Amino acid sequence: RKEVEQDPGPFNVPEGATVAFNCTYSNSASQSFFWYRQDCRKEPKLLMSVYSSGNEDGRFTAQLNRASQYISLLIRDSKLSDSATYLCVCSNSNSGYALNFGKGTSLLVTP
Amino acid sequence: EAQVTQNPRYLITVTGKKLTVTCSQNMNHEYMSWYRQDPGLGLRQIYYSMNVEVTDKGDVPEGYKVSRKEKRNFPLILESPSPNQTSLYFCASSRLSSYNEQFFGPGTRLTVL
C-alpha cells in the first residue's frame, strides 16, 4: 500500500464553487505535511504547508486530522486558474529524509 | 533569480547509451533530489542528497546513479538506459531544515527507444 494516497479525480467544478480534496497517509509517525500544485506539463510548486491547528491562505484552507490520518485542502470561490493537479506530501525526518508524494488529485474548474 | 536548472530539457536516446542529466541550483540548498513522474504512478523519488558527498536511495533507485561533488550540482546518470526509464524527470532542492519545501526544476522529458 502506498504511503500517501489521493483520489485522482478529476474533480470538475463550476467557477465559484467550493471544492475539497483529502489525502490519507499510512505512517502514523509522519510529522510534516504539504500541498503542492502542478500545472499540466510543468513542475510542481509548493502551495502551502499543513499545520496541526489548520491554516488558511486566501481562498485556500489546509487541515490535518491526525486521528484519521488525513490532510485536506479546501478551495473556496474556485477560479479557472485553480485548474491543476494537487499533490500532497508527508514526511518523517526521524526515519530519514525521503519524501513521499501522493499521485495527485486533478481539478478542472469550468466557466 | 533563484532557480533550479536542468539540462537537457528533452532527450531522445537509444537503449544502452549512457546519459547524464544535469541539475544545478543557485540557492545554496543542502538538500537535492531527483524524481520521475509517470502517468498513473505519480511523482516518485529516485535519489536524494542531504549535502555534499551524502546521498541516499529513494523509492525507485534501480538503474540510476547520482553524485554530489559540489553543493550546487546533482547530476543523474543512466549508465545503460532502458525503455522503462522513459519518463519525465524533475530535480528539486531545498534547505535541509525544511526539506519538504522543495523548489523544482522545469523537468527533463526522456525517451529511450
Image (cartoon, grey):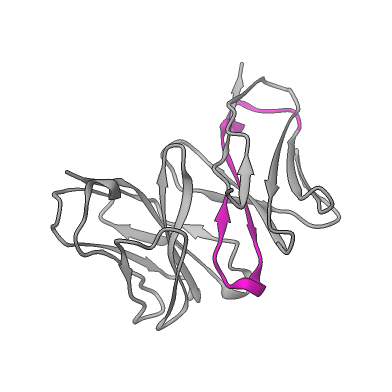
Specify whether B12 is left or right of B63.
Answer: left
Where is residue A79 drawn, in percent x and y?
65, 28
Observer-nearest of B80 and B23: B80
Q: Residue at x 23, y 46 (%)?
A: B83
For the image, the number of numbered tags is 0
Residue farthest along the top direction in this orientation? A111
Observer-nearest of A18 and A66: A66
Q: Residue at x 74, y 28 (%)?
A: A77
Where is residue A6 drawn, in percent x and y?
62, 40
Specify whether B113 is left or right of A20.
Answer: left
Q: Quadrant of the N terminus of chain B?
A: bottom left
Task: Specify start and end residues of the magenta stretch as a single range.
Answer: A76-101
Location of residue B59 with respect to A1 vertically, above or below: below
Quadrant assignment, res A93:
bottom right
Location of residue B45 with respect to B55 vertically, above or below: above
Location of residue A73 with respect to B43 vertically, above or below: above
Where is residue A16 drawn, in percent x and y?
73, 22
Observer-nearest of A37 and B48: B48
Q: Quadrant of the C terminus of chain B?
A: top left
Q: Is residue A27 located in the magenta-colored stretch of the structure? A: no
